[in-house]
Image: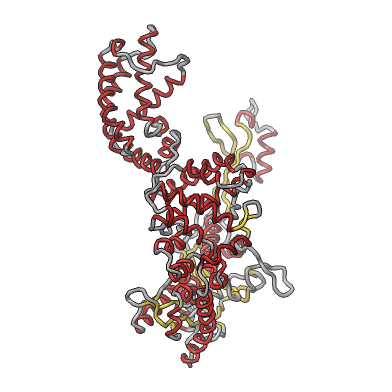
Amino acid sequence: MANTDARDLLIEIGTEELPPKALSTLAEAFEQGIRAGLEKAGLASGAIHRFATPRRLATLIERLPVRQPDRQLERRGPAFSAAFGPDGKPTRAAEGFARSCGVTVADLQRQETDKGAWLIHLSVEPGAATTDLIPGIVLAALAGLPIPKRMRWGDRDDEFVRPVHWAVLLFGDDVIPATILGAEAGRETRGHRFHHPQPIRLNSPADYARQLASEGRVIADFAERRDAVRAQAEAVATQLNGAAVIKPELLDEVTALVEWPVALAGNFEQRFLNVPAEALISTMQDNQRYFPVVDARGRLLPHFITIANLESRDPAQVRAGNERVIRPRFSDAEFFWNQDRKQPLAARMSDLKHVVFQQRLGTLADKSARVAALARFIAGHSHGNPDGAERAARLAKCDLLTQMVQEFPELQGIMGRYYALHDQEAPEVAQALEEQYLPRFAGDRLPQTATGRALALAERLDTLTGIFAIGQAPSGAKDPFALRRAALGVLRILIEGQLDLDLLTLLERAAAGFDPALRAGHAVETLFEFVMERLRGYYLDQGVRPDAFEAVLDCRPTRPLDFDRRVRAVGAFRELPEAASLAAANKRIRNILKKVETVLPFEVRPDLLVEDAEQALAGRLVERSSEAIPLMEAGLYGDALTRLASLREPVDAFFDQVLVMAEDAALRDNRLALLNELGSLFLRVADFSRLQD
């Protein structure tokens, strides 16, 4: 019988400062490892809580049983017929089985199954003590953490992401004896490195977070600490008559750097606001882990917010120190800004020929020329400005040669826009220089200008085609040129940007821009299939059913926007009550036509429609075709399918009442032609035979 006695268990691993960007991942993985270990051991507990600070990973398990439940074991022996002789006495097989179980034959039992009767031995294995299991579970969880590079310290063989200095295994009021990565487990934790460096004797597992906060000046719960950082930053920003700019990833990183957050405001000289705000914000966020402050209109204010890891007795000195650190970075940005503007972006075009894009694909000057021609083509076929698109493409990579972008690479494109505006380039050309990199990641915003869309497409298509042409397509997890992201960007711009362009044509046009010796055209078909695979993932992420995607893919539309309209129409169609029957009819038509070896007539002959059901279907098909085909040609697939739904009744009647494979060859071929016409009509949208129930 399972032991119902249960206690709380606290597991804490105390370390030197853990990598801030990995802290949340490590904490989550540690908790999952503990959960998996408990589940494998058959230890069902109450709620499990995780804690993470720069110096600790911890897990609190509520109401953990003190023992595993007992296990009923069943061991099967020989068949009953082989266990006893005709005289009813045990055979050697039965006696040998009993001895192996440590009992007599009389202690064995008979089990009836559908395959006969068997001799079995039933026993109970007592559950192990939880205290005996926990050390192994903890070590397994630690070994399973996603740590790319482990380190050793001292003369020990133990390896972990950082040296371990203490460990806590507190089960109720008892310490579980164990050595965890060189540290003897106890009931003492450590408080804040500066506010309370002395050990803290824990009263109970449930008291852990409260004691750390009240005695140790440590907020152990990551989410609680993150909320405190956000609230303090927002409060300080309000005092400055502004709002804090809080990126979620920076908030997490700052939270992972502090155990007792204290927000402080800093200031910088007003003159630095003449530098593009993005450069200042990048410095504050990426280099100093500061939160910028903006006014109600989103304009940068000459303030920042830093999160200290202690309550200083002299906050003014802490503030001055942070201001002193940021000033040289801002001065550099100011210098670069002033120096870069001494020559226009266009003056750097000639220098692009000295920068290699890829050894076999030429320089950035070569790439700019190819992209310019392709962007001009795209703009001309999407109601854009061909001259503007070509100009933007020529300037697109020039900002990579500026001092500002060389110092702050994350500002590529952004600084191009600023410098282009300073050079009095057309506003849409300037905006395109920034938009060429959009979308930068999944869910990112798309280019908003026609010129930006043309440039962003041309840039990605050139890279995709060139890299595929030299045989460096992504393999497995390796994708050094981020081609998967580039392909998805192309699809999003075409679909979400409502550009009804033919992808295959664009790829062929891109391939034509390369040196003929490269034979880039040979890579187009493979590249097209690669992009279609990205399209599959795009729809699966949106909840589109795989069979709907396959149904459209079988018709091989080459315009992604058209593909999207079809997929959406198929999704809406399958919700109609007529959908299942018509999908089944399409499957039946496909199967019938597969077996036909003769060439079918191009048209249905009305004089050979002798059955009422086939006459009704032919008549309705003519009516609905005349309505649906113009809608399909206009891309209104949903409206077209709604009209075709009314074919369900005559289609069902046809299959119920008409023998398709009639003995009369003329009748048979005419009926096959009718079915072919029906199936072909649906194939103008998708292969509905691919839809699953």
184 relative position to 529: left or right: right
Q: Which residue is drawn at 26% across and 32% down?
A: 643
Whether residue 685 is visible here, answered yes or no, is yes
Task: Check the image and report above or below for 547 versus 28.
Answer: above
- Front residue of 50/493: it is 493
Q: In which quarter of the image is the C terminus?
A: top left
Render colour scheme: secondary structure
Whether residue 207 is visible here, answered yes or no, is no
Residue 2 picture location, percent across and down: 50, 56
204 relative position to 100: left or right: left
- Front residue of 194/322: it is 322
- Front residue of 217/425: it is 425
Residue 574 picture location, percent across and down: 33, 36
Q: Which residue is drawn at 50% across and 50% down?
A: 373
Task: Check the image and report above or below for 36 versus 111.
Answer: below
385 relative position to 154: left or right: left
Q: Which residue lies furthest to the right in this view?
A: 155
Task: Check the image and report above or below for 32 versus 630.
Answer: below
Residue 620 picture location, percent across and down: 25, 23
Residue 335 picture location, percent across and down: 53, 80
Q: Which residue lies furthest to the top in this view?
A: 664
The number of discs equals 0
